[in-house]
Amino acid sequence: MSKSIIITCAPTGGIHTPSMSPHLPITPAEIATASIDAAEAGASIIHLHARDPETGKPDPRPELFKQFLPVIKQSTDAIINVSTGGGLGMNMDERLLAATSTSPEMASLNMGSMNFGIFPMLQKYTEFQHDWERPFLEMTEDFIFPNTLKTIKYALQTLGEGHGTKFEFECYDLSHLYNVKWFVDQGLIKAPFFIQMVFGILGGVGADLDNLMHMHKVADRLFGAENYEWSVLAAGRQQMPFATQSAMLGGNLRVGLEDSLFIGKGELATSNAQQVRRIREIIENLGLSVATPAEARERLALKG
Ligand code: KMH
Ligand code: ZN
């Protein structure tokens, strides 16, 4: 029997800006509600960023996270995953602070430095409600997302060994899988671990199906299929097709407005839960099932 599929939902992220969609959750209350609704729709992991409630700008302050994490925890059984990717331009100390001060079951960890460009799709936005949005988007052309081996090691030691937090290893390219393997060999990453393969970021690997197949094949060879869980996210319009492909190949998947603001061609998603419901329906129509948080916890050996 095939394994149930772990759905991660990433409700807000640190890339899209408020002018792009009125449905992007911004305030702690909105992020909490979006997360609870996504969990009720079938997401077992919620991947979280925070934003300044006044401006909507990605914001690393732990006190913002502390306004929504307990609310989500009280209302759902979902696994909390705090981003250490943060937002464009944040340094690693800022990016780690929310996770180190809340000690979540999971945190993201980006497995290599890279360009992090903005897609043509997002460049078409010209009308902005807030002064910060245009310079924020423009800066992506000259931005390197820094994730050095030293900072990755530091995160593995402080959050992983120090807090018992396990990671969503964000791999935007083949080389990032080899960086994971390096730390497995160093004894800093232990099975079972969770690889999130990221497609369609400008600067990372493109959202082409043969890339997905190849990354999966290489990951199996490097890690051994029994030692890790794999998941797929694609940014923009490939979100649902790639999530579906992953389900069909026995992988897990991620949706959410962090990765795509849309539910169909030219149609904004009205909520994160709408995207979760859509992929859940696809999964169930394929004769597959969705993992509960308890199942995901057990398979990922989370601290609970
Ligand atoms: N925004 C995604 C492409 C993180 O938060 O650590 C990757 C991400 C990074 O979720
Ligand atoms: Zn994120």
Image (cartoon, rainbow, N blue to C red):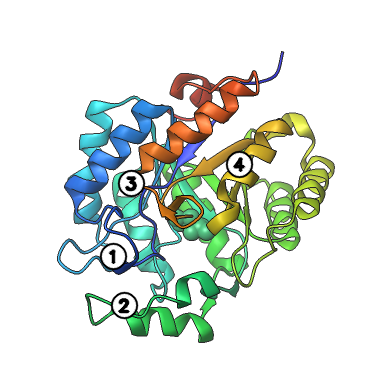
Which quadrant of the picture is home to ligand 2? Answer: bottom left
Q: Residues within 10 Å of mark 2 (few under 14, many from 20)?
A: many
Q: Which residue is mark 3?
A: 270
Indicate which disc, 1 or 4, sits on the residue closer to the N terminus.
1
Looking at the rendered structure, the secondary structure element under dot 1 is helix
Kindly identify which residue carries mark 1: 18
Query: Which numbered tag is attached to residue 217?
Result: none
- In this rendering, which labeled residue sits more in front, label 3 or label 4? 3
Mark 2 = which residue?
133
- Viewer-proximal residue among 165 and 274: 274
Determine contact: label 1, label 2, CB under 8 Å. Answer: yes
x and y percentages locating residue 129 in the rendered image: 22, 75
Q: Which residue is mark 4?
A: 243
Q: Earlier in the sequence, mark 2 or mark 3?
A: 2
The reply to whether dot 4 and dot 2 touch (C-beta < 8 Å) is: no
Reading the chain from its start, which is encountered first: label 3 or label 1? 1
